Image (cartoon, helix red, strand yellow):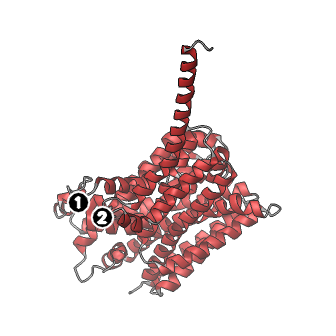
Amino acid sequence: MATNSLLVFGVVAYLLLTVVIGFIAARRVRSEKDFALAGKKLSLFMATSTVFATWFGSETILGSSANFVREGFLGVIEEPFGAALCLILVGIFFARRLYRMDLVTFSDFFRLRYGVVAEIFSAAILSFSYVSWVAAQFLALGIVFHTITGLSLEVAIVAMAVLVAFYTTLGGMWAVSLTDTVQMALIILGLAAVFVFLLQEAGGLQVILAKTPASHFSFLPPADFSPFRYAGLWMVLGLGSIPGQDVFQRVMSSRSEQVAAWSSVVAGFLYLSVAMIPLFLGLVAVQLLTKNDLPQDLQFLLPQLILQKTPVLVQIVFFGALISAILSTASGALLAPSVLISENLLAKVFRNQDTLLLSRLSTLAIAGWALEMALAHRHIHNLVTESSAVGLVALFAPFIFGFYGKNVPSLVAVASMLSGFCVWLFWQPLSRLFNIPHDDFPGTVAGFLTAFLPFGIFYGGQILKKTKTLLARASTNGHGFV
């Protein structure tokens, strides 16, 4: 692809600035708590920035815009609508109480409610779930860098993975929050400026809407669309990301419980508003690009639009916003499992080791694993969906019962995690075995429902036990034996 030296220079300069911020942030990291939670000192503005910027990533700009062009709102329920729903629910129902618990990781919650065994299982499952999300960001960064510079996609992916791993390992949550604050401003201002410029080129919003089928803007599925599949679209990110280390980390990094709650709610509404820009830019691209110019892979749609239809200054603004969005998500997604592995897994084996060192080594290990996955896969949206599905099928049920319930045995929680995860993982052969249409009843819904069964059995047994006790007392009283 043709490149412009000024564009390449601008992007490289921005990447170097990110590294400089990483070095500055590293000076603030003196303990595991600084690395994981930025010392619990984030203001409302910084906390909102890091929540928004962490979630506003490649799947929002590249993946969702492609899905919206193909399927309309029905194709983007998971992202951005489900994602925004998750952030708002966390802020309203969970943030304040979680903040008061003063935990370092989400798996600390499982240890407090269910014991060490549940902590270890939850940490392993959560860490596994983040790898594909990190891989999606590495892939997206590689696509962008490849588009700008003309380097091979593989080389571009490796270069970007090394950059993200470097500054995240240096500065931890301080690096993430400082860069996120800058990146949020770049994302919003950059996307808004590009949208205004290209909308004028396309003849205005009314022209775009007039040329787009009305069905594109409907949230309701067609008559033959399975209700279980539709519910699954809302739940994967809407509920599946609630028990997530990345959301939890930002809640706990706030300087007060009020900041923790409000930053999540504000970020949710802000996220949903700004996410409309790349969706509608996809429609603009369809109008402005000829059929020969449209890429076969629609994940390249917006970069192709910008390179062909805008001057170099607009290109710098767009790719600066795009790289900002992906970098912020990549660093946040990389930090989350690193802290889980060091705090809840490795610290139990290497008891005398510095947990800050373990966190940094874990960051490098996760980055290497995610890089291998990014090189093997080529679809951003699928990688992100896989990540959130794990939280939905394995962790949502034990989190809810741990949050609102009392005195639930560890065995019940672990059984819930494993049963939901295994049903989801092996749903394709299981659905054939029980003659259940796989597309109409997806594995995410099957795993989600299965995870509630151990709790249903436990509480059912408790109710039965109490009922027998009451009946025995009533029988004894009836015969005069008090």
Q: Which quarter of the picture shows residue 304?
A: bottom left
Residue farthest toward the right in the current orientation of the protein: 352
Residue type at mark 1 is: His
Q: Which mark is residue 297?
A: none
Q: Residue at x 52, y 34 (%)?
A: 464
Q: Residue at x 63, y 62 (%)?
A: 175
The image quadrant where one finds the C terminus is top right
Residue type at mark 2 is: Phe
Secondary structure found at label 1 = helix
The image quadrant where one finds the N terminus is bottom left
User: Which residue occupies the foreground of this view, 293 or 448?
Assistant: 448
User: Which residue occupies the foreground of this view, 227 or 317?
Assistant: 227
Task: Give the tally of numbered discs.
Answer: 2
Label 2 crowd bin: few (<14), some (14–19), many (20+), radius 10 Å: many
Secondary structure found at label 2 = helix
Q: Position of residue 102 (x, y in %)?
A: 67, 44
How far is mark 2 from mark 1, CA to CA? 8 Å
Q: Position of residue 95 (x, y in %)?
A: 55, 43
In-image side of 114 versus 418 (left or right): right
Q: Which quarter of the picture shows residue 170?
A: bottom right
User: Closer to the N terminus: mark 2 or mark 1?
Assistant: 2
Q: Position of residue 146 (x, y in %)?
A: 45, 82
Q: Is residue 331 visible?
A: yes
- Looking at the image, residue 429 lies above or below residue 51: below
The answer to the question of whether label 2 and label 1 lie on touching residues, with beta carbons closer than 8 A, is yes
Residue to which mark 2 is pinned = 68
- Looking at the image, residue 8 lies above or below residue 104: below
User: Which residue occupies the foreground of this view, 475 or 5?
Assistant: 475
Label 1 crowd bin: few (<14), some (14–19), many (20+), radius 10 Å: some
Q: Which mark is residue 216?
A: 1
Q: Is residue 10 visible?
A: no
Q: Position of residue 43 (x, y in %)?
A: 60, 47
